Every structure is written in C-alpha cells, then in structure tokens.
Image (spheres, grey):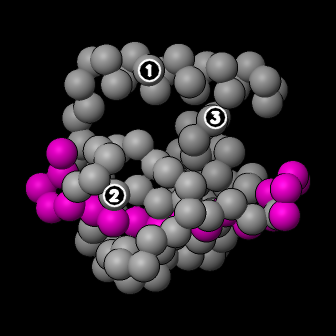
C-alpha cells in the first residue's frame, strides 16, 4: 500500500471502440492497486490521456512515449499530483506481480 491512500480517476480518450472514452478509477484504500470502471466523486487526482498513450504505458510499457506525452500535454493531471507519486512506492506482493505480468502478456499478444 502507498504511504497515503490514492483515489484517482482515469479518463482515456480517442478509444477506437465503444463510445470513444473509457472512464476508470483506482482507490488503493478500497481495492488495492486494481482499477475499476467508472469515475468516483471524491478522487484526489484525475489523469486524462489518449488511447495511444495509455496503450504505450500499460501494454507496451514504453516509458519514452509516456515521458514525451507528459511533456507535450497528451497526459493531463488535474488535482493533487503528489498522490501520483505515492503510487511509485507500491511494491505489490508476488502473486499480484505475477498476475499483472500474465495480463500484460495476454493483452500485448492480442493487440500486437
């Protein structure tokens, strides 16, 4: 768990399916580090980014693309940015790390 709880909304735009936008949230006090669909009212921070950047970050884990997107404004952060820094300190247990790796590999396989 991070040093402080983190309630973050995530908005992914320009999604090539559905209605074009995905709304999700992360609440480390409620669900640990697993996101869920929909936004929450009492979020500390909201991160908005386009689909290509989200894919580069989550699926491809391409930090260069993510860094460039942040610098050029393709990632917008509204609210308490320090809460995002708490997420850097997360060290999930081995079973969660293994599950995340398996999910990442499966998503990469179907999106490549």
Residue 59: x and y, percent? 63, 35
- Identify the disc placed on residue 12: none
The circle on residue 99 is: 1
Q: x%, y% of residue 2?
A: 18, 51
Q: Which mark is residue 27?
A: 2
Sooner in the amino-acid sequence: mark 3 or mark 1: 3
Q: Is 41 positioned to the left or the right of 44 in the image?
A: right
Q: Is residue 62 above or below residue 73?
A: above
Pointer 3 residue: 60
Q: Secondary structure at mark 3?
A: loop
Real-space CA distance between mark 3 and mark 1, rounded to the nearest whole angstrom: 16 Å
Give the residues in magenta: 1-19
Answer with the quarter of the image where residue 27 lies.
bottom left
State the quadrant of the C terminus.
top right
Look at the image and tell me whether residue 65 can be seen: no
Visible in this render: residue 60?
yes
């Amino acid at each position: 768990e991070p040093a402080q709880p983190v309630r973050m909304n995530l908005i992914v735009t320009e999604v090539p399916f559905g209605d074009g936008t995905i709304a999700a949230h992360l609440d480390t006090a409620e669900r640990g580090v697993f996101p869920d669909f929909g936004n929450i009212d009492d979020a500390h921070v909201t991160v908005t980014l386009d689909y290509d950047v989200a894919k580069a970050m989550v699926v491809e884990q391409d930090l260069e693309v993510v860094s460039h997107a942040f610098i050029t404004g393709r990632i917008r952060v509204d609210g308490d940015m320090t809460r995002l820094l708490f997420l850097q300190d997360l060290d999930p247990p081995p079973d969660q790390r293994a599950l995340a790796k398996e999910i990442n590999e499966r998503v990469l396989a179907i999106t490549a």
